[in-house]
Amino acid sequence: MKKFYLLLILPLVFIGLSISKVSAQDVSSSISVEITTPSSVEVYPGVEGAITANVTNNTSSDMTNLIVYITMVDVVKNMTVNLEDYSADVPVVIPELKANQSETVTLPIIYVYPSEYHLYVTVATKDNLDIISSPSIPVNIITLTKIDYPLVKITSIAVPVLLLLAFGFVSIQRKRRNMTIQK
Amino acid sequence: MNQFLINKEIKENIFATKGILWLFVSSLMLSGLSLGFISIKELSLMAQNEILVTVGKVILGIALLITIILGSVSISNEREQATLESLLLTPNSASSIAFGKLIGILFIWLLVFVTSIPYIYVLSYGTGLFLSTSVLIGILGSVLVIIFSGISIAYSIFLKSSKNAIIVSILTLLITSIPIFLSTTMKKAGFGKLIDSVSPVSNVMNLLKEVIVKRADFISLIHYFIPLVIYVVAAILFLKFAVSKLNFEGGE
Amino acid sequence: MIIETQNLSKTYKNGFKAVNQLNLHIEEGDIYGFLGPNGAGKTTTIRMLTGLIEPTEGVAYVNQENVSEKNSTIKKLIGVLPESHGYYSWMTGYEYLEYFYNLFGGDPLKAKDQINYLLDKVQLLERSNSRIGQYSRGMKQRLGLAKTLINNPKIIFLDEPTLGLDPSGQNDIHKLILELNKSMNITVFITSHLLKDIEVLCNKVAIIKDGNLLVEDTIVNLQKLHSPQEIYRIKTSDTALAITFLKSISGIAKMETEVDYVEVTLKNVQETDLIKRRIVETLFMNHIDVFEITKVKSSMEDIFLNLVNSSTTSEVKS
């Protein structure tokens, strides 16, 4: 009897799994996105750029309101990036993408803080909860120079000391003047 | 405007209110911050242009605090120590007395700024940003000091009490600095966006970022300068109105 | 007239009428005493005369100029020592005078001489480089007086100049004021609670109460017309015996005896001559020689209290 139930249940389980796998496969391949230009970035801070991405509707039905945006992660400091600082926080909305059609979008960016990043383009839509991202491109914002540590240390000590000496000097001068008799 | 009034204000701000000691304390703060940028792990990871913006904000913050305190006690202190009557009995107008105090306060800002130049230099070393950062902090600091010390001197006239004038001046600074405490999202739309665009403190902070970090050109920054100019004019008019009420008509 | 007011009045915003229809007349060279109890309107009057506040009604003239219209011109001609007078304690005495010298637009080339002259005059030359914060009250008051003179004024207004000073300090101030008036012909407008100040310094006095002028006259006339009582000093050949007979005279209110004279206060000012005759006749009849009967002047205090405490207030033209 147990063997009978097992034989009945197991096929149902396999069928269920394959349905969900098929569903996942269907969603992830319904939209595809890839960065067309640039393939990599190496610039100094302050340079303006643009990321061009191609978004494709792989389904047989039209899609509406696709939100396309940049995501960046700092792989040196291991943290995400506030895209507002890079003027890259405004997404592009594709109002309608017809079946099996592609659209190219341009996303502006200003390369600001020196570090190494991975940049990718992501598409989200109201119609489903999955997020589709492109492969990332390497972005290297080159630091102009490093701070001169000894100079900083010298300045940090010298300025307060000089001011203290100035205060002492001025106080002594006034006391000396007050002690002399005006003739 | 009487130069002797101004000279006296400068001397008083330096000697009587221990101005040099204040400069020493503010230099200690900047030294601490600078050493932090090279020794504390989290701070040392900051990019140099980011460091300059942070230091710029601290310099302006120190300047604002010193100048609104000096402005708040300017006229009320004269009243409290019974020297105002003698001043008003000289041929100098009440207006020249009040604006003489404003210029005296601007001189203290100048000293704060000069003291901070070595720090700006070492922290901008090699970036080519020293001149633009210094000039920008100098100009923006002067604008903020004129606005807030003008308002503080006016409070000092109206409120006739140093304690009350200091409290109200600090509250005014905090209210105009509200956008600094808002999140990025809140400043994108609605009321947050509105107050971010009209707050003088907010405009100055945004200008620092635009010039030092994003290296924006001057033309694109006009919309930040316009509110500042309006505030300067408004502060001066407010002070002029307060000066017209500087009298002993209360029977003191 | 170097100072003249016509119906000068001041009503503050809260409705309080501090000064009412004041008519003052001060000649050049006068040391003019302006008396009144606390809250009478003295400081308000000085502030209107110096242009610090605007009168609600009437007009004040200083040096023939309308104070309201020629405010900054008049400020150059006057020096003022307010009652509550503060100092910049971080300044030295010299710096303080130099500051005001420059505010009045003094010639920079003559600054040192003028300042040292005034410091010498007020006996502060040796302490001129000490901070004012280290000065005694008397020294500060003398410094204030020097500041009042820094612009070589024609008229000085002194509001309670001897307040808080010891008798020696008061004496110094008196001497200074008298000397300034004599040597530089400076007109002095002075208020004081110390009526002895007024007696010593002033030739003319006005008394104000509740904002109203009670009287304005020379001291001599005030003593003649407003003395509350008449006191006579009588010197005789036998003081002790004279007293026994004087007791019987009905017109005498009070007697005070000293070793060689007796002071009698008469009851009725109107019957002065009659009572005096009675005194002389009584003593003569009892073989007591009268060497002297002299009138003792009423003090300013007596006159002041008499006028201020009386119920009628009427202006008396000088």
Image (spheres, helix red, strand yellow):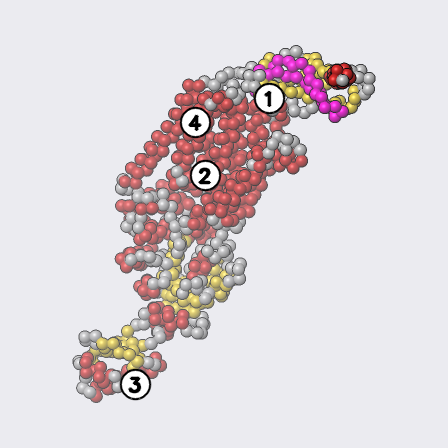
- Please name which of the two marks, 1 or 3, marks the residue nearer to the observer: 1
Residue beneath the point at 33% across and 36% down: A171
Q: Up-down: is C224 above or below C129? A: below
Q: Is residue C266 left or right of residue A42?
A: left
Res. B104 mark: 2
Seen from this angle, which residue lies furthest front? A1
Residue tagged by mark 3? C250
Marks 2 and 3 in Cβ contact (< 8 Å): no
The percent coordinates of residue C148 (x first, y second) are 37, 52
Q: Local crowd at mark 4 within 10 Å, few (<14), some, or many (≥20)?
A: many
Q: Local crowd at mark 1 within 10 Å, few (<14), some, or many (≥20)?
A: few
Query: Do the residues indicated by labels 1 and 3 lie within the same chain of the protein?
Result: no
Q: Quadrant of residue A143?
A: top right
Residue tagged by mark 1? A80
Amino acid carrying mark 4 in the image: Ser
Q: Local crowd at mark 2 within 10 Å, few (<14), some, or many (≥20)?
A: many
Query: Do the residues indicated by labels 2 and 4 lie within the same chain of the protein?
Result: yes
Q: Quadrant of residue C105?
A: top left
Amino acid carrying mark 1 in the image: Thr
Amino acid carrying mark 2 in the image: Gly
Main SS of the magenta part reads: strand
Marks 2 and 4 in Cβ contact (< 8 Å): no
Magenta residues? A113-139
- Please name which of the two marks, 2 or 4, marks the residue nearer to the observer: 4
Q: Local crowd at mark 3 within 10 Å, few (<14), some, or many (≥20)?
A: few
Amino acid carrying mark 3 in the image: Ser
Element under label 4? helix
Q: Quadrant of residue C32?
A: bottom left
- Please name which of the two marks, 4 or 1, marks the residue nearer to the observer: 1
Query: Do the residues indicated by labels 2 and 3 lie within the same chain of the protein?
Result: no
The percent coordinates of residue C1 (x first, y second) are 42, 62
